[in-house]
Image (spheres, rainbow, N blue to C red):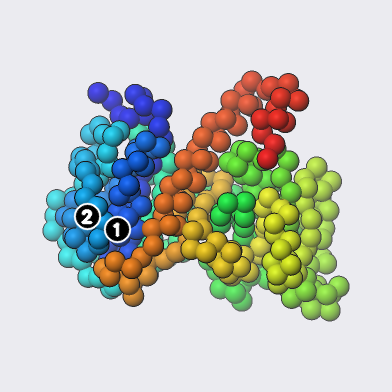
Amino acid sequence: MSHTQHTDRKPVVAISHGDINSISYEVILKALCDQRIVELFTPVVYGLSKIFSFHRKTITIPDFQHHTCKRAEPFNVKQVNLVNLSDRDYKVDLGQSTETAGELAVLSINAVLEDLQKGIADVMVTAPINKENVKLALKKPFSGHTEYLAEKMGVSDYLMLMVHNNLRVGVVTGHIPLAEVPKKIHEPLVLRKLSILEQSLQQDFAIRKPKIAVLGLNPHAGDGGLIGNEDETILKPAIEKAQKSGMLVFGPYAADGFFASGQHNHFDGILAMYHDQGLLPFKILALGAGVNFTAGLPFVRTSPAHGTAYDIAGKDLASADSMREAMYVACEIFQNRKLWKELKQNPLPLGRYEKDTER
């Protein structure tokens, strides 16, 4: 018998187990404990059987059946699957950052990547990791899942996109120091990120003609050049070029007023200039159920929009809302991409196409 995707239409959701000392296993287990979830997709956790059992005992959830298998063994489409990556004994140090946790996080990520490339898995959901211990394990700089996966796949044009219902916020610059942001912002980069955002909104979220807002770099979007000139000299020309190419792009908007006045509700996508400018309002509005999605990769990758939360590891306090949402969003995007591919191969008459894809 071959793997699931050849015998079953449900997507295979490959979940990397994240940091073994954090809340990662807790949110994975809590997200998967409702057996109805296997009717929607086939969950496959890439982790360690002994660590799985350890964390299972630290939380209060109903007993649920899971199927343990080794690499390259068939998945059970009616149960949660655990691909056991090693039979070695590893110590769990709850709430601690250890090099072992970094090594095991990388082991899981790479195993998922391999199975995605082989077509064994359909989408990737990554549980939280600690950048410092992953850097120690890799013995080279590491700035996050997004950059690591893009580099592994040889992708230079990608976008970190935060998703919650109809709120989608992308960032031009990601995990870099704030002092570096103005040096990195230039017109071609903004145009590339706008292009990735538009394409993702079309193929991943089934929005035929997305409306995109661009946030200004400076307070009050520069106030006509009084508070920095990047908004006038870089962002406005980029927006005008995007508009001339047929994109529905508007701005630059002052970030504070944009969110405070509810303008974000009138756009399909928002492009922020730097990490905290986009993620701070997003996380407040998403109320703990946000999802991090990497647009521009050849496969679908999502993750919960929270970190390792070492302070509550092993205390049965973590919410699985964001992790569960990451799984749902990954499946939705996977199906939308399939539909997009079909539409591109066999274009429908315009009227019907609009009816099917307009949101």
The residue positioned farthest toward the bottom in the image shown: 226
Cα distance, mark 1 to mark 2? Answer: 7 Å
At label 1, which amino acid type do we have? Tyr
Position of the N terminus, as image quadrant, is: top left
Which residue matches tag 2?
A: 52
The residue pinned by badge 1 equals 25
Label at residue 203: none
Q: Residue at x 80, y 43 (%)?
A: 245
Image height check: is 231 above or below 352?
A: below
The first of marks 1 and 2 along the sequence is 1
Q: Is residue 37 above or below residue 284?
A: above
Residue 167, x across and y down, in percent: 62, 55
Q: Is mark 1 on a helix, strand or loop?
A: helix
Question: Is 255 left or right of 76, judged from the image as shown?
Answer: right
Mark 2: which secondary structure?
helix
Looking at the image, residue 26 lies above or below residue 34: below
Q: How crowded is mark 2: few (under 14 residues within 10 Å), some or many (20 or more)?
A: some
Residue 19 point in image, percent of width and height: 31, 62
User: What amino acid is found at the position of numbered circle 2 in the picture?
Assistant: Phe
Looking at the image, residue 70 sits to the left or right of residue 176; the answer is left
